Amino acid sequence: MGLLDSGVEINKYTKDWVIQGNGSTYDEDELNKAHGTYIASLLVHGDKLNKTEDFSLEGCKIMDVPIIPSWNIDEKILIDNIEKAIEKNPEIKIWNLSISIQGEIKENEFSTFAIELDRIQKHYNVLICKSAGNDIAFLTGGEPGKLSIGADSVRAITVGSLNRNTDKFNITKKDHPAPYSRIGRGPSYIIKPEVVHYGGDLFALNEEPRGREEYETVDSIGISVNGEKMQEPGTSFSTPKIAKNISELKSLTESEDLLMLKAMLIHSARYSELINIDDETCLQKMGFGKPSTAYQIINEPNDHSITLMLRETLRKGTLIDIMDFPYPSNLVEDGYFKGRMIVTLVYDPHLRKDLGSEYGQSNMELKFGTFDEKEDAEGQRAIFNPIKRKGSQNILLESLYSKVKQKENEGYNYERTLIKYGDKYYPVKKYACDLNEFTEANKKHINNDKHWFLYLNSQYRDYILKENMREKKELETEFCVFITIYDPDQKENIYNRTIHQLESNGFVYDEVSLNTEVEIDVDN
């Protein structure tokens, strides 16, 4: 992975792992390498130093390209440095950026820095993991402010911080948002940050701490430029863990598909069962939650679940309507379908600067649900598809589910909250639901004689439609959908049943295979 930072000191801890990339405009004596060296040490030795299991692989090959000198630089120079680093190292596709510009994002306008990061990622086909930013307002009893400028990049993965542990005064709570981690949402109410990871804990030294000296840093042991152990908290240090997780996914799947890898990571993200804050605050501070490790993402835990992926490019004027979706037929109880599911859609949006809140010019609509039967289409619809669905019901709607049953099903709260967050023009949409929570009146939609469908359609704003009409270009949107279905009772073998239904219905499919030949020599 690539590191866009202050530079890494080459010492006995980093010499076998860090490669100096091309494109930096600064000499060695112009750099203060403290920040970059600490990040590199966490990536290479973090699990061993902290006795943790944040990663699937030990060690990390790092392409180091310093983009900031020991003095302050302006936004334009920073953007130029980032672009030059990425341009000069085209083999690196996943980059960590734990550098922020001073200031907070706006509610209905994307920052110039974010827009430039989006342009760079599109042009060079790279993925940037961007830190949410830090705020010390908690030291005086305040709440963290909005995301730092640049964290509103639509194409980047924005990362906040979690607490790994709980202090004895219960001020810092395990798996809750770190008190210093800046919060979303992003402009136009998009979900930012998307994910979180452990960024170092601050433990209170008394019941009412007031000042940095009344907190101690625990967790996140790393190495300083002098080769000594040190500890620092911040989203700068949770962000590279996400970048490494994606790099591991890339290595283990041998895939160059960055959109798929991004979707795979976000699909795996969860909240802890320990969370006890309201849904919207949870989303603003932690996005979709903390992702699993690369091995956990790739390997299905047992035969009681299955994950299906659809990766495609959808042209304007076309749609996807799968009417024989292989929902496992053995997930039935008392005449109704049962099961829990997680559905994640990630697409590459069309973006246009200088349009304020309408920076995002494309949307994808996703519906997943049941229908009664197929029938012949008539008129205009028959031109595109001679078959249509009768009695369709999208199950990804909050109104179908019982509030009473949700309260009774407390163990599922940490996932179910996601069903609310699939609004228009969100480049990431994620839903989670439990069919056992359907209201009695709506259970008719999950009778076991129903058929299942998956529907996807693209939508565009007037500006880009007119622009492409003038330029005579064809609009299309790349997307990736992941759907995980599992039996909460862990009784039914739904993996084998779904594979059988795929084959019976004539689906052409491939299994994502794990590269078991990844070898990294680690100096003990």
Image: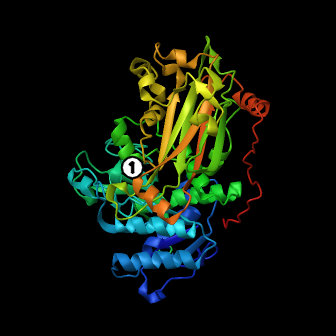
Q: Quadrant of the N terminus?
A: bottom right
Q: Is residue 96 above or below residue 428?
A: below
The residue under the point 45% across, 62% down is: 467
How many callouts does the rendering have?
1
Q: Amino acid at mark 1?
A: Ile
Is residue 504 or residue 17 the one in the foreground? Answer: 504
The quarter of the displayed image where residue 61 is located: bottom right
Question: Where does residue 199 sit, x and y in percent of width and height?
Answer: 44, 56
Left or right, residue 233 beside residue 379 = left
Question: Where does residue 365 sit, x and y in percent of width and height?
Answer: 50, 41
Left or right, residue 415 beside residue 45 = left
**Structural crowding at the residue carrying mark 1, measured as other residues with C-alpha within 10 Å and reported as few (<14), some (14–19) or many (≥20):** many
Indicate the colouring scheme. Answer: rainbow
Left or right, residue 57 beside residue 149 = right
| Tag 1 residue | 190
Q: Is residue 465 above or below residue 65?
A: above
Is residue 171 or residue 477 the one in the foreground? Answer: 477
Q: Is residue 325 above or below residue 47?
A: above
The quarter of the displayed image where residue 331 is located: top right
Q: Quadrant of the C terminus?
A: bottom right
Of helix, strand and loop, which one carries label 1?
Answer: loop
Q: Is residue 448 visible?
A: yes
Is residue 449 or residue 387 the one in the foreground? Answer: 387
Question: Where does residue 288 sit, x and y in percent of width and height?
Answer: 46, 44
The residue under the point 53% across, 65% down is: 122
Question: Where does residue 337 sit, x and y in percent of width and height?
Answer: 60, 19
Q: Is residue 57 visible?
A: no
Is residue 182 or residue 447 the one in the foreground? Answer: 447
As drawn, the residue found furthest toward the front would be: 379
